[in-house]
Amino acid sequence: MFQAGICKIKSEYVLPETERVINLNLVSDKDKSNISDKDEEPDLKKQRFSKRDKKKLKGQNKARGPTFHVNKKSELCDYYLELTEGQDLPRCERKNCQNLHDIATYLQQKPKDIGESCYNFQQTGKCERGLTCRFGSEHIRNDRNLIDLDKFQINENQRLSTKNLLTKDLQWSLRKRTYNFNLSDKLIQFNDQLYKESGENSEATSGAITDEDIIKLKKRERKNIIWADKLVLSPLTTVGNLPFRRICKEFGADVTCGEMAMCSSLLQGAPQEWALVKRHFTEDIFGVQLCANNPHLLTKCGQLLEQECEVDFVDLNLGCPIDLVFKQGAGCGLLCRKKALQSCIRNLSDVLSIPLTIKTRTGVYNNQNVAHILAPQFRDWGASMITIHGRSREQRYTKSADWQYIREVAKAASPLPVLGNGDILTYDDYKIAKETVPELAGVMIGRGALIKPWLFKEIKEKKLWDISSLERLDIIKKYVNYGLEHWGSDNKGVENTRRFLLEWLSFLYRYIPVGILEHPPQKINERPPLYKGRDELETLMSSPSASDWIKISEMLLGPVPQDFHFLPKHKASSYQ
C-alpha cells in the first residue's frame, strides 16, 4: 500500500551537497546515533557500519544512561515543600533523612528560576512543589508558599484531574502480598478444570473448586464500546505518556490507551509502572495495556484494575517485539505459545466486566502470518476487539504495513470489530486504508501521531494542514506545561519533562512541512534530503541532531544541568 522512497522537496529548500557534508561533519559522534543510517552518504554508511553492527543498532538504544542525577543533599526535605504563611516549621520524622532542612540555605543555593510565571499556580491557585518550584517567584514570599484561595477553591475538583493513583495503602498491600487475589486464583483453577473436562487444550490444576462465585462472575453483563469509525491512539512506550495523550485528545483522538505496563511490576506496587495507568479526566475512553507471559499474572492484574482503577477497557499486548519481552514469552512471544495464549485470554476476559481488546502483529516471522488463524479464536476465547499491526516482529518498521493482510484478518474475525494499524500519516493514508479494508471498524494511529499529533484533526476535517513553525512551537509549549503539571515543576520534574520532551522530539523532527514538499502529502516511510525550513525555527525543528533538540528544550525549560546527556530510547528505522 505504502512505498518507501525519497521525499521530494522544492528545490529552493534543498541544501547543496557541499553544505550537506559540512552539516554531517558538524554533528558530534553522540548525535550521529540519532541519524538514520540511510540519511548518510553511501560511502560513509558502508565505512561506518558492518552488517553485524547495523543489526545491533536496531530497536532500543542500549547506550543510554540516566539524563539527570538528583543530589539529595541539595534538595529540600518534603516536609517543608508546602510551608505556607503563618505555619510553624514542621519536624522531619524520617530517620537518616539526607535532604536539606534549612529553608534559607536551600533558597540561597537554589538554581535561578526558569520563568516568572508558574503554570500550576496559574491553573489551580496552588503549586504543590512549593518552595522547590523552578517558576516559584510568583508564589514564594518570605520563605513561604503562597496560595490564591479564590482560585484554589474554584479549581478544587480539577486538582483531582489525574485518576488511577497508587495509594500508600494499596502499595503496602501489594508489596506485603496481603491483597486478596482469591477470585483470580479460583477463576484460573475453575477454567483449567472446565476446559480439561471439555477436551480443550489447557493445563489442569489440582485441588477442590468452588464455582459459585465464578458462575456469578461469568453471568454478569459486560460493558460495551462502539468502535465504529473511532480514531484510537496506540499504546506508545515511553512517548505515549499522559501529557502527550492530552495533546492528542485536544486534536480529536477518540480513544486513548496507556503505555505497555508489565503485570509483574504492577503487582509489586512499583510507582514507575503505576504511572503508566494514570488517566487524565479529559480521556473519556481510556484503556490500559498489559503485558505478561502467563495467565496468573494477567488475571490478577485484571482483577486489580477492575477493583482499584477507572478503566474502560484492558488491552493485551501480543505485539511487543523487544528481545527482553519476547524471550520471556510475552508480547509477540505469546503468539508461539498457543496453550498459554488461550488461557491468558479466557481468564483475563472472564475476570473483567469491561472489554478485553488485543493488539497483535501479523506474526513473529516474515513469511509465517498467523493473525488470520488466531483472530477467530481470539473472538471465541472472549476478546471484544482486535487491533492488527500490519507487520511481523522480524520486520519491525523495515517494511510497509500490509493492509491487504489486515483485510484478511478482519474477514476472519467477523463479526468481531477489527482496527487497522500501520503507516497512517495523512488523511489520504486514512482514506486509502478504509477503502482497502471496508470491513475495518476503525483505525489505530501510532508513529503518525508522534510525528504530527494534529493528524486526528486532519482526518476529521479531511484536510492537509500546512502548520507553521510557531504553531508547532505552541504545541510543544503546551506539552511542557502539561509535563510540569504531571511530573512537577521542581528540579526533578523539570528534567523529567525535558527528557520526555526530547524523546518526543526524536519523532517530531521527522515531520516535513507541507509548504516545502514538491508533491504533498508526506509518506511515513519517505526520507527527505537535508533541507532548510521557511524560517530559522522550522530549520531547527527539522534537525536530526539531539543537540538541536536540546536547544528547543532550553527555550522552554532553561539550560540543561552540567551533567546532562541524552540519547533517544528508540532508534526507529522509519525511513527504511
Image: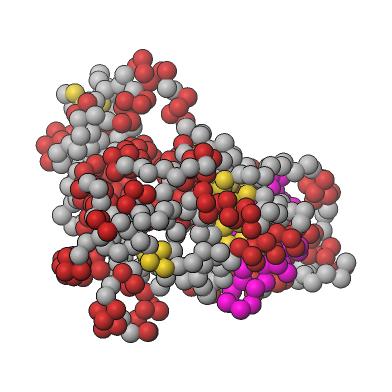
Name the outermost residue toward the right. Answer: 198
Q: Where is residue 240 in the image (x, y as percent from the top left)?
A: 45, 50
Across the whole image, how many numbered discs are drawn on residues? 0
Q: Which residue is rendered at x = 30% and y = 56% of the image?
A: 10
Q: In this view, does 526 lie to the left or right of 414?
A: left
Q: Position of residue 467 (x, y in %)?
A: 36, 42
**In the rendered image of this protein, does residue 117 appear above or below residue 109?**
above
Q: Position of residue 156 (x, y in %)?
A: 44, 23
Magenta-colored stretch includes residue 33: no
Q: Is residue 13 left or right of residue 349?
A: left
Q: In this view, does 420 lie to the left or right of 523?
A: right
Q: Quadrant of the N terminus?
A: bottom right
Name the outermost residue toward the top. Answer: 150
Q: Which residue is rendered at x = 52% and y = 42% of the image?
A: 462
Q: In which quarter of the image is residue 56?
A: bottom left
Q: How is the image coloured?
A: secondary structure
First to last magenta residue range: 349-378
Name the outermost residue toward the left. Answer: 108
**Residue 224 visible in this rendered orientation of the protein:** yes
Q: Which residue is rendered at x = 79% and y = 72% of the image?
A: 201
**In the rendered image of this protein, does residue 38 appear above or below residue 480?**
below
